[in-house]
Amino acid sequence: MANDSDLRRGLSTLLVLRASVVTVLLLATVYVNVGSLLAFEAPTTRFLLILTGGTYLMTGAYALLHRRLGDHAGFARGQIAVDSLVWTALVYATGGGASGFTFLYGLEVVLASALLGRSGALWAALVSWLLFAAVTTGLAQGWIPVLADQAHAFERLPAGEIAYTLLVNGVMVLLVATLSGVLAERVRRAGGALRVAVRREEDIVRSVTSGLLTVDLSGRVETLNPAGAQIVARAPEDAVGRPLSEVLPAAASALAAKRPRGEGEHLRPDGTQIPIGFSLSPLTDRDGQGAGRIVIFQDMTEILAMRRAVADSERLAALGRVAAGLAHEIRNPLGAISGSVEMLRSASALGEEDRDLLGLVLDETKRLNALVGDILHFARPRAAQPVRVDVAALARDVATIFRRGSAAHGAAIEVEAPATLEGEVDPAQVRQVLWNLLKNAAQAAPGGSPVRLRILQAESGLRIEVIDTGPGIAAEERSRIFDPFHTGKDHGIGIGLALVKQIVDAHGGTIEVDSEPGQGATFRVTLPVTAA
């Protein structure tokens, strides 16, 4: 049996065919009787006109019903049975067994095989033959009255001829049913296999994550898959039929220049611009003849970002190696300078002013030594060694030490933390994160302004927040504050925040910054309960 969509189409064809047959019958009846209006009063003519009108009404009713009914197979059987009755009435009015319209039975059987398969064809053949046998035998035996205007010319056939007519008609409809059933079965199998193949190809094209479109020999788009429609921000039905130069101009330029691949910028209809990469290959038909081009393309935004990240990583790695070498070379003379200054400062012959100057030298060498240490930590990071630790207590200890040192710059350090909050982290590295964030906030905040350190539970682990009331960070700076050797301050070399991010990444956490110019900044670190 045909599938539901095929049945609906077949029923529509049956409606059109029935209307065509009765229209031809109506025109023929009018043509034969057009010479005299009195001829329309003849019983045969009236019968044919009534049959035609009734068939039109029945066809209209079918047209209204067949889209609303769910059982299309049952509806098809009902239509074929009623149609067989209509053709039998037509045979009755045009000579019975000698009618020239008996071919309609065979046509009905063919339609039944197309709609209902081999069993439907045999069923239609049986119904048609029984109705033909009934009208032929009934007219011959006088069981069915002959139309009045045909009575003078009607000849009752002998039993032998009736049997011969029924046998020939039965064999005819049986052969038609058998042959059409076999043919319909083969066509249906081939069509089913073709539908499966087409559906599989459509599924493959729809599942491809890259954009895929085809263009004909004139350069107009024939197909566009969903991924491609998303990339170019255009519905497939809107792209089909348009020149490739409108849908994907970069690919059209490459096609004109006979370049098999390339990259370019694509301007979407909404005004946004994205980088794309594409490749073109010939589209051939079954005979190997050129039928157009296949264009495979993709959004290169993420790929270009990865390329930039890799280039930055390589650049930073090289810079880190140089910085590590310089740090080692600087640390050795710093030690010598610091030791020499200590010895000079202890000399009894120095005045108080000279001792103060030497003290400044020592302070600066300590600061340089700390910077060198930061560079070495960044260039050669130590792997995180997580242990179970109370992060809340650790944060309070760091804040206490920080308040007593010169790095606080007079800022009021406020700590908000629960009594205890444990997590598996590297305590030394988390101390460094807390210290660098507090130092950064204290440098940004006006003298005496509060700096808040908050430790709290988060859904994905624990959170550290450092909030200052400084001048804030501009939007263009926020995207670069974690880059090494980038700083917006008059002093420092931009290692602190880069080191913080490096440690947070090593723990499998995240760091974010919220800031608006003039409204301070909030650095938010989220660490998993168990370090990565």
Image (tube, rainbow, N blue to C red):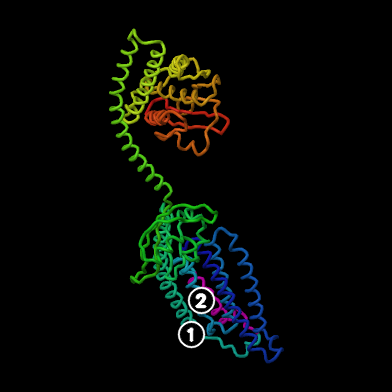
Residue at screen point 61% across, 63% down: 65
Q: Is residue 182 above or below residue 479?
A: below
Determine the CA span between mark 2 and mark 1: 20 Å
User: Residue 172: image x %, image y %?
Assistant: 45, 78
Helix, strand or loop for the magenta stretch, by majority: helix
Residue holding disc 2: 105
Q: How many marks?
A: 2
User: Residue 392: image x %, image y %?
Assistant: 46, 18
Label drawn at residue 32: none
Q: Secondary structure at mark 2?
A: helix
User: Residue 28: image x %, image y %?
Assistant: 61, 85
* In the foreground, 510 or 357: 357
Q: Marks 2 and 1: CB-CB under 8 Å? A: no
Residue at screen point 60% across, 90% down: 153
Of the image marks 2 and 1, the number of the one nearer the N terminus: 2
Identify residue type, mark 1: Glu
Q: Is residue 521 above or below residue 403?
A: below
Q: How many C-alpha atoms fall within 10 Å of the one at disc 1: few (<14), some, or many (≥20)?
A: few
Residue 80 lies in the magenta-colored region: no
Q: Is residue 475 above or below residue 42?
A: above
Most distant residue in the bottom direction: 35
Residue 125 lies in the magenta-colored region: yes
Q: Is residue 164 above or below residue 124?
A: below
Identify residue type, mark 2: Tyr
Which quadrant is the C terminus positioned in?
top left
Label drawn at residue 161: 1
Discs 2/1, front: 2
- The residue segment tinted magenta is 124-147
Q: Secondary structure at mark 1?
A: helix
User: Residue 530: image x %, image y %?
Assistant: 39, 25
Image quadrant of residue 330?
top left
Q: How many C-alpha atoms fall within 10 Å of the one at disc 2: few (<14), some, or many (≥20)?
A: many
